[in-house]
Amino acid sequence: MNGPTTLPIACSLTEAELRERRQTIVKGFSKMEVRVTELPDGYVYSLPATSEVLTQVTQLVDMERLCCPFLTFTIIIEPAGKGIRLEITGPKEAKALITQYFDFDRR
């Protein structure tokens, strides 16, 4: 069996598609309180534990996994309604892209 496949660190969207996608994502998350925690290989986004937030997070992951296959997305549902965490990680070279694209405070 071969070793792990190295995927290129590049989004498959055009610049215009990327801007439009980012605007849609930020709009969806702009009314939420989002806490960001840095990881060595990405970030954790802590969000309110509501059904609406969970739906938005799963839609985001579904869209992004197709155009950024080099990223790993992990959705964690905390017990007793304490919150939802979205971990986005990837290769070292991808961290700058995660920082730029998922910066929900930059509206």
Image (cartoon, rainbow, N blue to C red):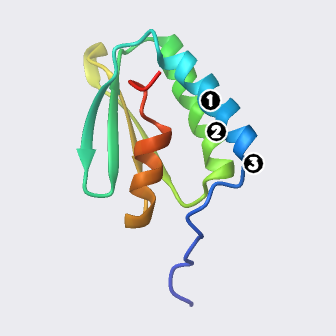
Q: Nearer the viewer, mark 3 or mark 1?
A: 3
Residue at (53, 12) in percent of width and height: 52
Q: Residue at x 61, y 43 (%)?
A: 64
Residue under pointer 1: 59
21 relative to 24, above or below: below
Q: The N terminus is located in which quarter?
A: bottom right
Choose between 46 and 30: the one closer to the eye.
30
Residue occupying the point 34% across, 14% down: 33
Label 1: element kind: helix
**Marks 2/1: CA distance?**
5 Å
Residue 21 in percent (x, y) is at: 66, 32
- 97 left or right, relative to 41: right
Residue at image location 68% in from the left, 49% down from the top: 66
Q: Which residue is mark 2?
A: 62
Q: Which residue is denoted by mark 3 in the rendering?
A: 14
Tell me the amino acid under the disc marked 2. Asp
